[in-house]
Each structure stands twice: as C-alpha cells, then as structure tokens.
Amino acid sequence: MALGITTAGAGVINTTTAIDLIKTTLDNLDRQSFTETFAYQRYPVCEGLFQGDKLPADGGATGRQKRIRVDVIENARGTRLYAPGSLIAKDVMQTLTWPWVMHEAGMIYEVSEVARNKGSAQIVDLVTTRRSAMWEDIANYFERRGMISPDASTDDLNPQGLLFHARMLATGTSDSVGGFNGVYSQYQDGTSTASVGGITASTAKFNRLRNWAWTHDGVVNSTFLRQLRTAINRVNWRPPKMGTFKDPKEQRFNQFKVYWNQTSGEQYQELVNSGPDDREGNASPFWGDLPYGPVDTVSTPVLDGVSNTPVIGIDHSVTKVVVLRGRWMVEDEPLRDPNNHRIINVWYDSEYAICCDDPRRNFCGHTAW
C-alpha cells in the first residue's frame, strides 16, 4: 500500500521551507505587541560599553596588543661649563596584551513549531518572542560580564570586565587617603592577580600601570565624597606643552563615568536633597543618576551585592571594547542542526576584548578585603 510520501510542492513544511519562512520573518519584523520583563532595572554597562564606540582591530593571534611607554631614560640633568657629559639608552616600552574572547548566542526552532504556527500572525509571534528572549539573554551576559572579572585565572570564556581594569589595594590594606597603589584584580573564585595586560604591576619599575585606589567605609557621606573628589582630580592627566607633545589635552570627563551600586546612588541622592536648595514643595527634587562635579555617576544593578562595595571610575576614552574586524554580532542564515534534521539554528557570533590602554586614568575605591 502506498504511504503517500510528500517530498515537495505547495504547502509542504520541511526543514528547507521552514528555514525560508523563518528567514523571511526575521527580515520583515516590524513591531512587538507584548510586555517584556527584564533581569536588571537598567543596563548601563551594556549601553555605555558595548553599544558605544567600539574600536575595530585587524588581527592579533591571541589578543589585542597596545604598546605603552612606562619609564623615562633620565638623560635630563643640570651641568656646568666644560663638564663632560654622557648619555644612556634603555628600553622604556612595554606591550599590553588583552586576550580575545569569543561570544555566541542564538535561537532554535523545530520544524513542527513552524508548521503549527504557519499563519502570518502566529509565525511573527513565534519568531518575535524567541528573538526578544535571545536579545535579553545577550544583554544580560554583556551587562554582567562586562562589569565583573573572569571566574578564575584560567577563564578564557569571559572578558576582563570593568572591575578588572579598576584595581584594588592589596588584601589587608586600608588607605583612606588614597594613592596610585591599585594593583590587584580579584577573580570570581577569590584569587587575585597583579597582571595588567600581561605585565606585573606590583613590580616597582611598572608602577605607572597602577591606578588610584583607596578604602572607604561603605557609606556615601561627606568623607566618602571628599575621597571621590580627590580620586577624580588625581586621575586627570595632561601632557606638557612642549617637545613632541604638540596638542596636549586634559582628560575629557564627558567620557568618564563613576559606577557604583544602587544603594550608593540612593545615598548620594539623599545627600544632594538634604542641601539648602529651594525645594518648591518637593521633598526630593533631585532624582536619578546625579553628576558629581564634572563626571556622571551611574547606579549599576550588577554591582549590588558585590563584595568590597567597589566604586570605580572609568575613562571610556582609554577603556573600551575592541572588536576583531568583521566579527561583531555576525548573524548567520538559519541553519539545519547537524544532529537533528528537524531543528533550525540561528547563530550570532562575536570576538572582542575589553582593553585599557592607560590604567592610571581609572580608579577604585573599596572596603578593605
């Protein structure tokens, strides 16, 4: 008895036609008609770091490299009439290496799902909701991993987040005054490293790779704000107006942000609102992320609950995402899964590194650890 096998023709829903239907729907999505919920109240890291200007790079076998001068030759000195002189030469250059990390995300469909939702409204709903969930998944990953440090020294799956580029004082150290002694980045497993782009910053000759760091009491008060003001002043570098420094520019604070947890942001709001300003009947006229001096402050949900209550200052002109050219959020065509003929995969791939070309333009205040 013939089974009536259908291999082609109008109305047949197989993997090939399902792939075409999904691709056509992806290309023509116009709007979403449902309410969405999210893991975080806001996504400042995702928006400020990953959606901002990303620097493209053409290569690097293991990572993005950047040369940095970390010393002077010390041939400048006073002299006398007819005094003999001599010059020395030494290597003052080092190379920072920030490892590439690979990221993938995607959506999956089953041919039967597509067949059961073949109507135009149903297939748009299926693809739209699946796509919405995927993009929040991507945003959640970048928001969290873009801030925190890798899981361990052997972690090559996750990037070195902003906390990795705003280093703390040595364990057991308290320093309420602050100084360029920020050397250590703590991994998620509790271990730490003094390596800055592959260079050991705890070594005296590499002290220019240390950022400003201090310890605070974990409460935003007048003492805390004084420490924060000092940190902002001290990381503001400007080259001399002479020699090869033809166009020295002071640090541009429009690219500088102070990240702290939401509790710190709320405590700062309370301080600002306790001032002598005319309230015009409003007990709390100042709201949201309020600036402090020349810089923006950013309440960051990912920092809620992070040990040591870090408050970090990041200069995004030197700390940014570098992407391998042609490898940022690359969307593939819908593909048949090699292990299941009914499964359709849509993949998104990226290769990038979070790099800091001048560590002394960042800072970190934290409680003692």
Image: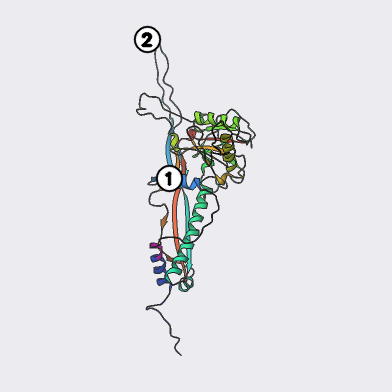
Q: Residues within 10 Å of mark 1 (few under 14, many from 20)?
A: few
Q: Compared to 353, does 181 lie above or below? A: above
Amino acid, disc 2: Tyr
Residue 189 on image: x %, y %: 61, 46
* In-image side of 151 versus 32 (left or right): right
Instruction: Identify the residue at horizontal 59%, vertical 27% (top origin).
Output: 177
**Prevailing secondary structure class for the magenta stretch in the rendered image:** loop
Looking at the picture, tell me which residue is in the foreground, 187 or 53. 53
Q: Secondary structure at mark 2?
A: loop
What colour scheme has been applied to the protein in the rendered image?
rainbow
Is 285 on the left or on the right of 85, as rendered? right
| Circle 2 residue | 82
Is residue 21 visible in this depiction of the protein?
yes
Residue 117 placement (x, y as % from top left) = 46, 71
Name the side, left or right, on which 238 lies relative to 164. Answer: left
Label number found at residue 158: none
Label 2 or label 1, whichever lies nearer to me, is 1
Residue 365 quadrant: top right
* Towards the viewer: 229 or 17: 229
Mark 2 closeness class: few <14, some 14–19, many ≥20 residues within 10 Å: few
Q: Secondary structure at mark 1?
A: loop
**N-terminal-most mark, 2 or 1:** 1
Residue 6 lies in the magenta stretch: no
Residue 20 vertical placement versus 5 (above, below): above
**Image spot of residue 324 (x, y percent):** 41, 48
Residue annotated with mark 1: 52
Numbered label tally = 2
Magenta residues (range)? 25-33
